[in-house]
Image: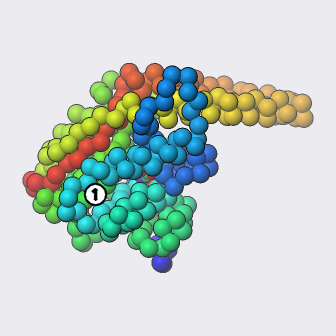
């Protein structure tokens, strides 16, 4: 398949892409989502990346089980490196994917053997004349403003078409700053979708079944991330003391707060967020 032309990617998206690239390096999986832990790990059970990969397969099965009968064509928005597209094509759906990252494009094409069309673009800029039976946002809705998401999806669906969203969402608008603050507020997303002509068909909260991934990430970060950083800092302090002084200052200035917040991610999630699978039907405006 022909590779699409490169695009101008905004800085925040480049930060997100870098984080996603780091994450795939850790998991070695074709999926970039949290996974669905079922059964839930028992108290004290060790959380491993191997179990997380099983949870990611289970997530694909769980989310895709919400696809209604009769759907044939699917646009996978924010398709990552192809995990969901592979899952869907293996089950007979005609899938097309889009994402604004050239590295993901390369991996998507490789992982899907060039069999699934890929568009290198932000959803907001996506131009398409044809319509799809279903538009899927698997953990990608949080990157797109609610009105862009709602109006863009409405343009791509015929009347009776479906929108399937699986993502972390904010329970209310009071939580405004911090690691999860780009997630949509449930009520704001609902308002924008209803205004654009969607009606809610299914709404399931799967927060408990994705939360172990947050615990695992914190654990991996503490065990490998912080330990490695400390080791490198000690080496630099021995080899190039002035560089260590600058590094310590920069660390305090820019990294202290995000690290403290990252370690508190589970508590923040439980207080302010939820993870939902929502199926919406486009009934026209
Ligand atoms: C957390 S990953 C989820 C990937 C995949 N859907 C999955 O479930 O494994 C988020 C995806 O959204 C994409 N994304 C970020 N901003 C986007 C935008 N404005 N338009 C479309 N996709 C976007 C990222 O490049 C990435 O592919």
Q: Residue 279: give x, y in percent of width and height.
A: 23, 47
- The correct choice, above or below, for 166 with respect to 106 in the image is above
Q: Quadrant of residue 115?
A: bottom left
Q: Nearer the viewer, residue 51 or 82?
A: 51
Q: Is residue 150 visible to us here?
A: yes
Q: Quadrant of residue 79?
A: bottom left
Q: Is residue 164 visible to us here?
A: no
> How many numbered marks have been drawn onto this rendered protein structure?
1
Q: Nearer the viewer, residue 206 or 50?
A: 50
User: What residue occupies the far bottom of the structure in this picture?
Assistant: 2
Q: Residue 144: give x, y in percent of width and height.
A: 35, 48
Residue depicted at x 57% and y 50%? 24
Q: Nearer the viewer, residue 246 or 160?
A: 160
Residue depicted at x 24% and y 71%? 130
Q: Quadrant of residue 258?
A: top right
User: Which element type, helix, strand or loop, lies under badge 1?
Assistant: strand
Residue at the spot of label 1? 135
Q: Residue 181: give x, y in percent of width and height.
A: 40, 33
Residue depicted at x 37% and y 61%? 88
- The correct choice, above or below, for 53 with respect to 158 in the image is above
Q: Residue 189: give x, y in percent of width and height.
A: 25, 40
Characterize the local packing of mark 1: few (<14), some (14-19) or many (20 or more) Cα atoms within 10 angstroms. many
- The correct choice, above or below, for 84 with respect to 236 in the image is below
Residue depicted at x 27% and y 66%? 73
Task: Name the image colouring.
Answer: rainbow
Say whether mark 1 is within 8 Å of ligand 1: no
């Amino acid at each position: 398949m022909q590779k699409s032309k490169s695009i101008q990617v905004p800085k925040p998206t480049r930060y997100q892409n870098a984080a996603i690239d780091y994450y795939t390096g850790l998991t070695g999986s074709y999926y970039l989502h949290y996974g669905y832990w079922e059964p839930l790990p028992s108290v004290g059970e060790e959380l491993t990346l191997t179990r997380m990969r099983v949870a990611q397969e289970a997530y694909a099965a769980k989310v895709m089980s919400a696809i209604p009968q009769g759907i044939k064509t699917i646009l996978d928005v924010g398709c990552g490196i192809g995990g969901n597209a592979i899952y869907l094509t293996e089950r007979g759906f005609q899938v097309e994917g889009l994402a604004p990252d050239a590295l993901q494009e390369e991996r998507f094409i490789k992982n899907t053997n060039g069999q699934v069309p890929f568009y290198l673009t932000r959803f907001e800029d996506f131009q398409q004349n044809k319509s799809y039976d279903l538009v899927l946002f698997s953990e990608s809705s949080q990157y797109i403003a609610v009105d862009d998401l709602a109006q863009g999806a409405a343009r791509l669906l015929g009347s009776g078409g479906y929108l399937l969203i699986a993502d972390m969402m904010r329970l209310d608008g009071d939580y405004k700053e911090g690691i999860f603050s780009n997630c949509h507020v449930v009520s704001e997303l609902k308002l924008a979708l209803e205004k654009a002509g969607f009606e809610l068909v299914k709404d399931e909260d799967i927060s408990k079944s994705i939360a172990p991934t947050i615990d695992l990430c914190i654990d991996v970060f503490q065990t490998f991330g912080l330990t490695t950083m400390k080791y490198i800092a000690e080496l630099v302090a021995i080899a190039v003391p002035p560089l260590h002084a600058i590094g310590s200052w920069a660390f305090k200035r820019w990294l202290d707060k995000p690290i403290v917040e990252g370690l508190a991610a589970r508590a923040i999630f439980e207080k302010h967020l939820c993870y939902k699978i929502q199926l919406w039907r486009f009934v026209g405006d």
